[in-house]
Image (cartoon, rainbow, N blue to C red):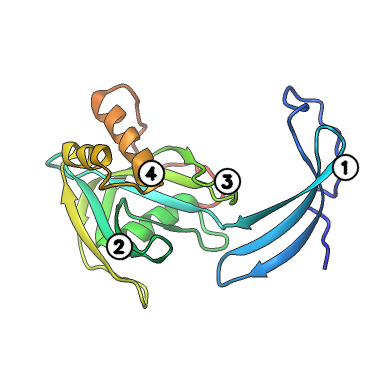
Amino acid sequence: MVEKPPGGGDVLDTGPDAHLRELTLHREPVMKGHFLQVVRDTVRLPSGREATREYVQHPGAVMVIGLLDDGGVVLERQYRHPVQRVMIEFPAGKLYAGEGSLLCARRELQEETGYSAREWAFAGRLAPTIGYADEIIDIWFARGLTLGERQLDEGEFLDVFTASSNELLGWCRTGEVIDGKTLVGALWLQNVLRGDWSLEWSANPSTDPRGSAA
């Protein structure tokens, strides 16, 4: 079945990037999985010719950089089937339908690590796989951490551990950390700790980067 794309097709683009943009003409579902689906779009290229684009639609996700009082950070070791290895990562997880970004960050941090945070700060966003997926990950910092009980999902297995920022940066340099979101998180962490990048901390930030309830 062929679907009309969101927005209904032809829209005149007169912005500064109009000579680069592709116009989606229609969309065809290819595969629908448990939480991911693949679609095939027919697009009009800037030259006027048509082409197809296949990509994964993702509900979006969050990543949490948990700062401990001793200067360390909260990390996880988790097996990732597509790359067939255990990865070192910051806590992260996908958004539920209608769930706000901050609410997701609070939930994922508590469920996966057992930690809850006194204060939160939104850092930024990253698009990890722009060539074949529309996933956007929101980056949150958390501090004033208190350790409680984890609530892992059925079938979820991971180890939680802490490390210094220098240890983490060393693992990024040597290749022990290759997860894209964690590498970006390490960049943010480094610049925040050096004072080059600032954060606005709050016990309950009033804005949500995705425009939904916090």
Gap between marks 1 and 3, in whole Å?
A: 26 Å
Q: Is residue 214 visible?
A: no
- Assess disc 3: are there few (<14), some (14-19) or many (≥20) residues with their C-alpha within 10 Å of its C-alpha: few
Q: Which residue is mark 3?
A: 211
**Of the pair 24 and 160, the residue shown nearer to us:** 24
**Of the pair 98 and 34, the residue shown nearer to us:** 34
* Amino acid type indicated by mark 1: Asp
Gap between marks 2 and 1, in whole Å?
A: 44 Å
Gap between marks 4 and 2, in whole Å?
A: 20 Å
* Amino acid type indicated by mark 3: Gly
Q: Residue at x 57, y 63 (%)?
A: 97
- Assess disc 1: are there few (<14), some (14-19) or many (≥20) residues with their C-alpha within 10 Å of its C-alpha: few
Q: Which residue is mark 4?
A: 140
| Residue contact between numbered discs 4 and 2, judged by CB atoms under 8 Å | no
Return the disc, 2 or 1, that comes first in the chain's sequence: 1
Q: Residue at x 72, y 26 (%)?
A: 17
Return the disc, 4 or 1, that comes first in the chain's sequence: 1
Gap between marks 3 and 2, in whole Å?
A: 30 Å
Foreground mark, 1 or 3, reads 1
Return the disc, 4 or 2, that comes first in the chain's sequence: 2
Which label number is shown at residue 74?
none
Which label number is shown at residue 10?
1
Gap between marks 3 and 4, in whole Å?
A: 15 Å
Q: Which residue is mark 2?
A: 78
Foreground mark, 4 or 2, reads 2
Q: Quadrant of the N terminus?
A: bottom right
